[in-house]
Amino acid sequence: MLESAPFRVVAFVLLIAGLIVLSGGVVGQLLKFGTMVVVSLTHQPVVNPAFPEATLLKELDGLAGQVFEGYLAPLPGERPDVFATDSPLKDASAWGAFLATTKEQFGRGGARFLDKEASCVQAPGASVRLVYRMVFEKNKKGRVAFDFARGETGWRITQVEPGTHITVMDRLEPVVDAATGVCVLALVLLVIAKWLKTPAHGRADFLKAMALYEALTVGVIVVLFPFFWMFCTSFKASGTELIFNEKNPFDIVPNEPTLDNFKKVLKIDQAVVPGARVDDVIEQKNNFSTYFINSLFVATTAAFLVTLFSAMAAYVFSKKELPFKNGLFSVLLGTMMIPGLMYMVPQFFMICQMGLTGTKLAMFLPHLASVFGVFMLKQYMDTIPSSLLEAARIDGASEWQCFTVVIIPLAMPIILTLFLLTFLFHWSNFLWQLIVTDFANPLSITLPVGLALFRGQYTSETGQIMAASCFSIVPIAVLFLIAQKYFIEGMTQGAVKE
Amino acid sequence: MNRHPLLLAFAVFYVLLAILTWSQDVTRAPDGRTVLTFWHTYGDDETAALKEIIADWEKLPANARWTIRPIRLPFDGHKPKIRTALTVGLGPDMARVDWSFVCELARKNACVDLSTLGFDKIKDQYVPGPLQTNFIDGKYQGFPEQTNCVALFYNKSMFRDAGLDPDKPPATWDEFIEMGKKLTDAKKGIYAFGMDNTVWWTLPFFNTFGAHMISEDGKKCLLDSPQAIAALELKASLFATHQIEAGAWRAGGTPPEQGFQNQKYAMIFTGPWNLPRFANSKLDFGVGLIPAGPAGTSSNVGGNNAVIFRAGKHHQACFDFLAYFTSAEVQAKWCQRLNQIPVNLGAYDLIKVDDPHLKVFLEQMKSTVGNPVVTSFEMLENVVNPEMEAVLTGQKSAADAMRDAVRKVETKVLTL
């Protein structure tokens, strides 16, 4: 069907539309994310992120003075900033000017001024204050309302309804949108140019390739979106993690990014001076970086040793002759039928008897003998021809050389797989590490247990958990990146003889 | 090695890692006092306050022999950690545990009967609801140590939009339904109420109807009483008949807290732990008492108790510390600082609460009724939750479901 020219054009237009939607969404969110990271690094978080009070108050004070002068006169002798009336303002034009200027103030970044509601508020100290409620609508974020109250100490602005004030991110929004537009346009032009350059007979393939890329992009979005969500949430202020953009739930980049979560999990603000008390030192060191390093050590050591022992055992089971070999192997396999939880208390008891509670060795010692590992490696080694070993022996190789020079390199893909699986297991093994951790020494806490400390009985510090998770996926991602070359090498090895 | 650059890099990385790991260790010098270990699950702020209280207690002349070492566990794993530690004899002297865990520990003979240490003299000073969660098989097995309950949170601006008085939350269930109809706008996805459907979250319904789940001797389940059935019928009607509840309890539904923060639910039940979070998210909200039923307003009890373990050697010293920790003055200091609800009735007069929301909780707390005492509260939830869900989804009538629940509770939970 793609051979007919009109149909090709229709398909091309459809694919271009898909391209615009996809690239618009992806590039837009990525640019916004990049902006957010820069903003969070360059802008100090506002102490009260509700409203940039100080500067606006100053300006408002100047403006409002003219508006409310009419009220000052009837109350001689009273404090000039206390109003005792709820009658409408006399000078409508002054009020109009005030509104216009305030509108201007809030209008930056796309806020639309909706309405004012005037009311009288009885303050606790019995002085009556005039309050104006101003309601704004932000283009995407819904209603925002502020109370402007003139009290004894001057103007006070309170945000009474949730929403967002105009943040740096809001101001940058048009720039980000424009940049997104430019990127999308450039991409579309590029594709069109390529299309025009492609000769008519090659256009069907071009369309297929384009459709394939778009489908793959959708797949990538589906897979990576949770990670993107995690990164974004880690920049959200505490308490706002669960708030979503009403109009577009996929717009998850926070408008008021903060690095607080990262600072808290690493306890950066709690620096200790030399000579501080032991408890303070421990308290400061009891942070995410300690958990991370401990876990990295535990998981690496365990993965290395498990792989080594499993490879040795698998070699014997696969290539050596010994009495009752098959029976022994069946017994080993049989132990896999018993759930690991059953061993937990006896294993813990043994660890206690050895006096190893709370040590890093205890975190992985009982798991070093991995039947699963032996089974997996043996199955793979069975496929390595024994003639290779015989040839090596004829050339004078010792047993150790047979193992290291012949078997290990040939079994590298599966060895790396086992390494990775074991690493992952120990990286996230919560229950066992919880049981053997000696909490009296918080510096021995590992990552899965440490992450649980961010969760309380009823509340959890979602932002901090996400910030910590951002770091905790790094070693796994790095391992996969390094290992994938070997996986592919292993899979294609011997496939083609040239 | 030139042939294996990756291997070399790995070796170097590993050696560095090992050095880094061991450089972390810090040792503590002993000071000659007898150490009492106290396992707890507090957060950062609470831990700091606890350390100060411990320092104050250690300074008292009578306590010169003792030093208390607070050890923080993650709340999520405190039960398996304590179970396994006790099994091999490495448990602490005392611990702060979830209120529902005390019964299991007591029935496994792990904790000390406090009346042997003089608890009867001081027990009247505690708030009855939390105190009752420690009363197991006729003995007090733990101190109420920190407590909370749920109350009604409502969104003032949504009340305003619906033409309701933002300072008057519903006082009775009838008012609740009436207001709920005004607040609900199902087309926009806005509902008056979002609720959880587990046993603990349903206790406010049961308690406002005066229904008890378990008989006092702990041998019978009373869920098929007319009061309990009426309470459950009311709960189900909010979703099914009046359609003012969003179905937040369903799998995949927006959880109550999230719906409240995103202004989708005008009212939810939740506890004081959410006060700072909602304030942070700049919601205009108020807190009211749980709507009153035939038995008036009431709520559930949450929080933690402190137990002393038999395996420890210094029961009296532990008792003295926990009595000090839960005494009126210390509780007042603790609650003032951390915005929490005191477990000691004497502390209510000593603290000055500025937060109007917290004041409602203090009032609500006094009307709480002790939670059902069973060896495994998790098991109770596992057995009863599906039955309640069947009522809400209309698969069973409340009477049928509760009859089935009683049978299952009596065979599976009360026999543990």
Image (tube, coloured by chain):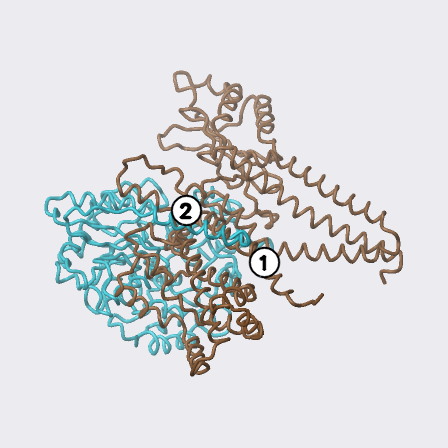
Question: Which chain does the residue under circle 1 lie in?
Answer: A
Name which residue type carries label 1.
Gln
- In the image, B109 versus B408, the foreground residue is B109
SS class, disc 1? helix
**Direction from residue A367 to residue B310 in the image, left or right:** left
Colour representing chain A: brown
Compared to residue A86, the image places residue A401 above or below, namely: below
Question: Which chain does the residue under circle 2 lie in?
Answer: A
SS class, disc 2? helix
| Disc assigned to residue A484 | 1
| Res. B318 in view | yes
Point out residue A118 in the picture as x, y percentages from the top left corner: 51, 32
Disc 1 crowd, CA 10 A, few/some/many (<14, 14-19, 20+): some
Compared to residue A139, the image places residue B210 above or below, namely: below
Colour representing chain B: cyan
Disc 2 crowd, CA 10 A, few/some/many (<14, 14-19, 20+): some
The residue wearing badge 2 is A289
Point out residue B140 in the picture as x, y percentages from the top left corner: 20, 63
| Res. B151 in view | no
- In the image, B351 versus A281, the foreground residue is A281
Residue drawn 38% across the image and 62% down it: A364
- Mark with earlier residue (2, 1): 2
- In the image, A436 versus B61, the foreground residue is A436
**Direction from residue B210 to residue A112 in the image, left or right:** right
Name which residue type carries label 2.
Ser
Quarter of the rendering occupied by the C terminus of chain A? bottom right
On the image, which quarter does residue B53 sit in?
Answer: top left
Residue drawn 10% across the image and 47% down it: B62
